[in-house]
Image: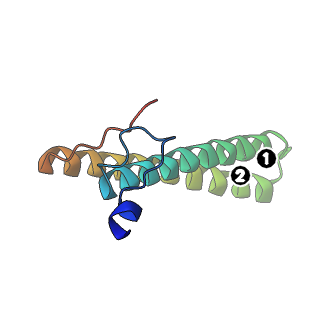
Amino acid sequence: MSKLIAQITNPAIPGQEDRGLSAFLNAALQAILVLGAILALFYLLWAGIDWITAGGDSEKLASAGKKLTGAIVGLVLLTTVWAIWQLLVNFFGIDMTFPTA
């Protein structure tokens, strides 16, 4: 009975059953990077709208500048994490391709 339970796989994800942790890490990292990029894009748009609607008010311009700087730093961090991940994957020769249907 325990062998039968160990052999249960998700039929909706072909090829996933033999990858285990590497597929999970790849999927999680891809989701985090996409979510981070979307959030940074919205933060950039928010900063731009604040900048445009500041109307010369120095406090609003400073706030918009801080938002803009934060969004750019976030994008740089996302890019750095992706580059380090790719370096580790290529260095250790890990197969991190995401299975497609």
Q: Which residue is mark 2?
A: 64
Neighbour class for label 2 at 10 Å: few (<14), some, many (≥20)? many
Q: Is residue 11 above or below residue 59?
A: above
Q: In the image, is residue 95 above or below residue 88?
A: above
Residue at image location 40% in from the left, 45% down from the top: 79
Q: x, y percentage for residue 28?
A: 45, 54
Q: Left or right: where does residue 74 sit relative to residue 62?
A: left
Instruction: Give left or right: position of 4 versus 13.
Output: left
The reply, left or right, for residue 48 in relation to residue 100 is right
Mark 1 residue type: Asp
Label 1 sits on a secondary structure element that is helix
Q: How many marks?
A: 2
Helix, strand or loop for disc 2: helix
**Where is residue 46 drawn, in percent x and y?**
74, 46
Give whichever of 93, 57 is nearer the camera: 93
Q: Residue at x 53, y 44 (%)?
A: 34
Q: Earlier in the sequence, mark 2 or mark 1?
A: 1
Mark 2 touches mark 1? (CB < 8 Å)? yes
Scheme by which the image is coloured: rainbow
Q: Is residue 2 above or below residue 92?
A: below
Say few, some or many: other residues with alpha carbon within 10 Å of mark 1 (under 14 / 14 to 19 / 20 or more).
Answer: some
Residue type at mark 2?
Ala
Disc 1 marks which residue? 50
Q: Is residue 24 left or right of residue 45?
A: left
Instruction: State the residue lying farthest toward the front.
Output: 1
**What is the quadrant of residue 37 in the picture?**
top right
Give the numbered dot on residue 22: none
Residue at 41%, 38% (x, y): give it. Answer: 14
